[in-house]
Amino acid sequence: MKKSDIVNLLLQEKESSLPSREKSMAFAPSNIALCKYWGKRDSELNLPMTSSLSVALPDKGAMTTLIVQDASSDTITVNNQQISEDSKFAKRTIEYLDLFRPQKNWHLNIEIKSDVPIAAGLASSACGFASLVSALNELFDWKLTHRQLSILARLGSGSAARSLWNGFVEWHAGMQPDGMDSFAEPLDVEWQSLCMGLLLVSEAEKPVSSREAMQCTVDSSIFYSLWPKKVNQDLALIKQALKTHNFSLLGGAAESNALAMHATMMSAWPPICYYLPETIAAMQKVWQMRKNGVEVYFTQDAGPNLKLIFLSDHKAIVKEQFPEMETVRLFD
Ligand code: 2P0
């Protein structure tokens, strides 16, 4: 099955394929997975091997503005800088837009304002595609549900399926070959005292994209066969922790899940290692703090940066240990 088949399925009942306005805009938050998405069962439709669970960063995301333009191609600007059509980022965006063009010669000016560095393991593609599909929904007045938008966002980037909501979100792996049961949903949980801190080790573009890293891991790591089992366990623990506000359970399961994901990468061939020396040093500091009775945990995505997880009572002491950390808002 192709991406275009899914788009046709979801948009077949829409009366007109032409946009109902000239301009639209939409914001989507980035999201940090507490239980990770790592590996696909279908790489055309970005169907995951397992479910995953994230928390949104409502102040870190992407605002996409779309303006219909009378031109021979699309133009893309990111934070007011025009992006070359030949760049990886532009190619991926244009290819995604091709799925929705009413006519071949129909083009857009796409302005993306992003609070997160592109491709540094801070979910820039998640908020990018989620805001893009939400802006398309406005432009064409499709009136799609968030669940349907989650499916369309997934076609751009898997983790984008989770970026349609604030708060905790679970992306169900689903089982159908067409992926119509692989969408995300918000969880009815709030946790005001839960804090997250971004520890930027490097903003440089990652040497291996998460897409390539995931594929290489699935194809070559002997440990990958254990990953679905690990996710099932961690997902259950994390959901229980959210329900009961059990912070030790949440932090432990999230940290262990991230470490296990990186272990599958290191056992891939060619090996994939997103750790920098500073990443390891920060991990050791976190472990030392826990030994000293300060409950702080970390999670790590496909990049060297860490996200620290702690409760508001410990904010001052964590900040003292990691002065360079940026605390991000999770809830209103
Ligand atoms: C996650 N990551 O759950 C995991 C953890 C990175 C590490 O989802 O190929 O950019 O576009 O579906 O979504 C990053 O992978 O990959 C990611 P594609 P995506 O957040």
Image (cartoon, rainbow, N blue to C red):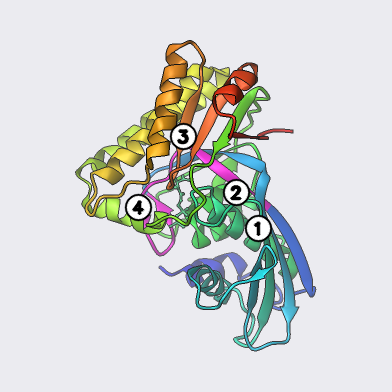
Q: Which residue bears the numbered disc 4?
A: 214
Q: CA distance from mark 4 to mark 1?
A: 24 Å
- Direction from residue 224 to residue 261 in the image, left or right: right
In the rendered image, residue 154, in percent from the top left (x then y), is placed at 51, 57
Badge 4 or badge 3: first in the primary sequence: 4
Q: Over which residues does the magenta segment extend?
A: 28-48
Residue at 42% in and 45% down? 37
157 w.r.t. 233: above or below: below
Q: Which residue bears the numbered disc 3?
A: 299
Secondary-structure class at tag 4? helix
Q: Main secondary structure of the magenta part?
A: strand
Along the line of sight, the residue nearer the viewer: 293 or 218: 293
In the rendered image, residue 161, in percent from the top left (x then y), is placed at 54, 51
The image quadrant that residue 257 belongs to is top left
Q: Residues within 10 Å of mark 2 (few under 14, many from 20)?
A: many
2 vs 4, front mark: 4
The answer to whether marks 2 and 4 mark residues whose Cβ atoms lie closer than 8 Å is: no
Along the line of sight, the residue nearer the viewer: 302 or 94: 302
Q: Is residue 311 visible?
A: no
- Direction from residue 61 to residue 241 in the image, left or right: left
Q: CA distance from mark 4 to mark 3?
A: 17 Å
Badge 1 or badge 2: first in the primary sequence: 1
Badge 1 or badge 3: first in the primary sequence: 1
The answer to whether the residue bearing label 2 lies less than 8 angstroms from the nearest atom of ligand 1 is: no
24 w.r.t. 184: above or below: below
Q: Which residue bears the numbered disc 2?
A: 163
Badge 4 or badge 1: first in the primary sequence: 1
Q: Which residue bears the numbered disc 1?
A: 131
In the rendered image, residue 187, in percent from the top left (x then y), is placed at 60, 34
